[in-house]
């Protein structure tokens, strides 16, 4: 059974920082990442990282957010700096397992990030 436990969300003023963590039980996943969903909007990819360390970021967060992972702890992190009110959303941890070209996605419960102006 795969379980994702997120932590680190909260309320911060614009320009501040937060660090999200997601501890995952189970096997090592090929891709770990973070998505977010703001009210009235679709869920969007924020950042992702492969088991080899390759990263991918949404244009809106490049230069401000940093994703990292600790394979020994099976944990993925999202360091968020220079936060803006438009970063306000529920942030979801996502891990991907690929078995024989079939993709399996697993999701955390979500953690609220609120950035005040």
Image (cartoon, helix red, strand yellow):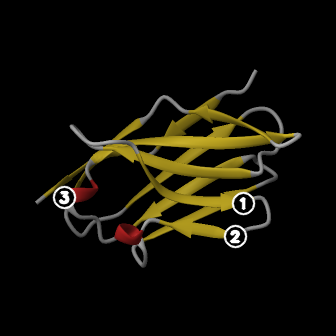
Which residue is drawn at the image coordinates 76% and 48% (left, top)? 73
**What distance separates the C-alpha of mark 2 from that of mark 3?**
28 Å
Q: Position of residue 19 (x, y in %)?
A: 46, 56
- Whether residue 12 can be seen here: yes
Q: Callout 2: 10 Å neighbours few (<14), some, many (20+)?
A: few
Residue found at the far left of this picture? 117
**What distance separates the C-alpha of mark 1 from that of mark 3?**
28 Å
Which residue is drawn at the image coordinates 82% and 45% (left, top)? 28
Residue found at the far right of this picture? 100
Q: 8 or 105: nearer the eye?
A: 105
> Label for residue 50?
1
For the residues bearing labels 2 and 1, Cβ distance under 8 angstroms: yes
Quadrant of residue 39 within the rendered picture: top left
In this rendering, the answer to whether 79 lies above or below 40 is below
Q: 9 or 1: nearer the eye?
A: 1
Using residue 28 as the reference point, say whether residue 36 is left or right of it. left
Residue found at the far top of this picture? 1
Q: Position of residue 53 (x, y in %)?
A: 73, 68
For the residues bearing labels 2 and 3, Cβ distance under 8 angstroms: no
Q: Position of residue 79 (x, y in %)?
A: 48, 63
Placement of the N terminus among the 4 image quadrants? top right
Mark 2 vs mark 3, foreground winner is 2
Whichever of callouts 1 and 3 sits on the residue coming sooner in the sequence is 1
Whichever of callouts 2 and 3 sits on the residue coming sooner in the sequence is 2
Placement of the C terminus among the 4 image quadrants? bottom left
> Label for residue 84?
none
How many callouts does the rendering have?
3
Which residue is drawn at the image coordinates 34% and 68% (left, top)? 60
> Label for residue 54?
2
Which residue is drawn at the image coordinates 44% and 65% (left, top)? 58
Q: Which residue is mark 3?
A: 85
């Amino acid at each position: 059974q795969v379980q994702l436990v997120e932590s680190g969300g909260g309320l911060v003023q614009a320009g501040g920082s937060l660090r999200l963590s997601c501890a995952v039980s189970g096997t090592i996943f090929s891709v770990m990442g973070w998505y977010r969903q703001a009210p009235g909007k679709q869920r969007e990819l924020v950042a992702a990282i492969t088991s080899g360390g390759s990263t991918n970021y949404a244009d809106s967060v490049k230069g401000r957010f940093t994703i990292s992972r600790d394979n020994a702890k099976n944990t993925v992190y999202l360091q968020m700096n220079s936060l803006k009110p438009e970063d306000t959303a529920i942030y979801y941890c996502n891990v991907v397992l690929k078995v024989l070209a079939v993709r399996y996605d697993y999701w955390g419960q979500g953690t609220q990030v609120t950035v005040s102006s």
